[in-house]
Amino acid sequence: MKASRVSFAAALAAGTVLVLSGTAFAHVGVQPGEATKGGYAVINFKVPNERDNASTTQLEVNFPIDQPLTSVMPQDVPGWTVKVEKSKLDKPLTVHGKQINEAVTKVTWSGGKIEPGKFQQFPVSVGKLPENADQMVLKAIQTYDNNEVVRWIEEAKEGAAEPQNPAPVLKLVAAKAGDDHHAAGDAKAADDKSDDKAHDEAAKSGSDTTARALGIAGIVIGLGGVAFGIASRRRAS
């Protein structure tokens, strides 16, 4: 009897862990979880279906107006229609010498279906990311075909337990020193390719010039031979 109770308790504990783990990993989230400050990045909104008797048919992601992005470009997702909405900025931005008066504040995917037991990713290219912030809170709203709406908008507080419906959070980190080296390496590789191309073109040009010179020399020699032959015949006669 004691062994049975121990086994039951262990099974119950394991089941509880699985349930809690499933719940923790079932939230709408953003991947990767971090990006470089002041840079551009491609992020994916991962949307799992948390219901056994309904399918997700719409995802709405809100971008904070107080952290305006000059570029938000969603990638096409087969079976889904995407709508991008912009809002006027209270304070215009200047980017590459141009004044930006509005920014994307909402992207909505609809028309598709995420069935029970499945998930879908929605990729978006974003930038220029804030330079003076440590994170962006990207509140999302998930709609099911039974008209249920789940709002992933709660912000986690430091030291507190995770909220029931946490909003996706993109952490912003400083650029790594190695990033510049990669850029320099790419630039050097491009220069090397340019030099190689120039070298090949120069070599080809030199070969063409030499070929032309040899051809002309051959013609001259040939004409000289013909003239010499004619002169010899005249002398013989």
Image (spheres, rainbow, N blue to C red):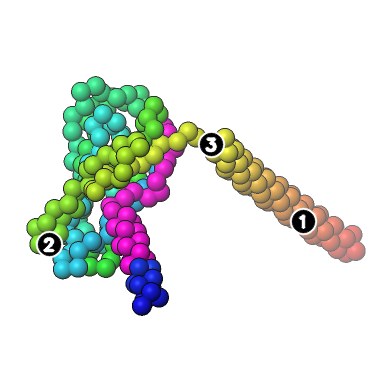
> Is residue 123 visible to us here?
no
Residues under labels 3 and 2: Cα distance? 44 Å
Give the magenta range. 11-40
Residues under labels 1 and 3: Cα distance? 64 Å
Q: Residue furthest front?
A: 1
> Is residue 66 visible to us here?
yes
Q: Residues within 10 Å of mark 2 (few under 14, many from 20)?
A: some
Q: Residue furthest left?
A: 147
Location of mark 3 (residue): 176
Location of mark 1 (residue): 218
Q: Mark 1 or mark 2, which is nearer to you?
A: 2
Determine the residue positioned at 12% across, 62% down.
Answer: 145
Q: Earlier in the sequence, mark 1 or mark 3?
A: 3
User: For the residue marked with disc 1, what is the amino acid?
Assistant: Gly
User: For the residue marked with disc 2, what is the amino acid?
Assistant: Asp
Determine the residue positioned at 24% across, 62% down.
Answer: 49
Location of mark 2 (residue): 145
- Residue 212 in percent (x, y) is at 70, 51
- Residue 33 in percent (x, y) is at 39, 46
**Quadrant of res 17:** bottom left
Q: Residues within 10 Å of mark 3 (few under 14, many from 20)?
A: few
In the displayed structure, 1 sits above or below 91; it is below
Q: Earlier in the sequence, mark 1 or mark 2?
A: 2
* In-image side of 215 versus 230 (left or right): left
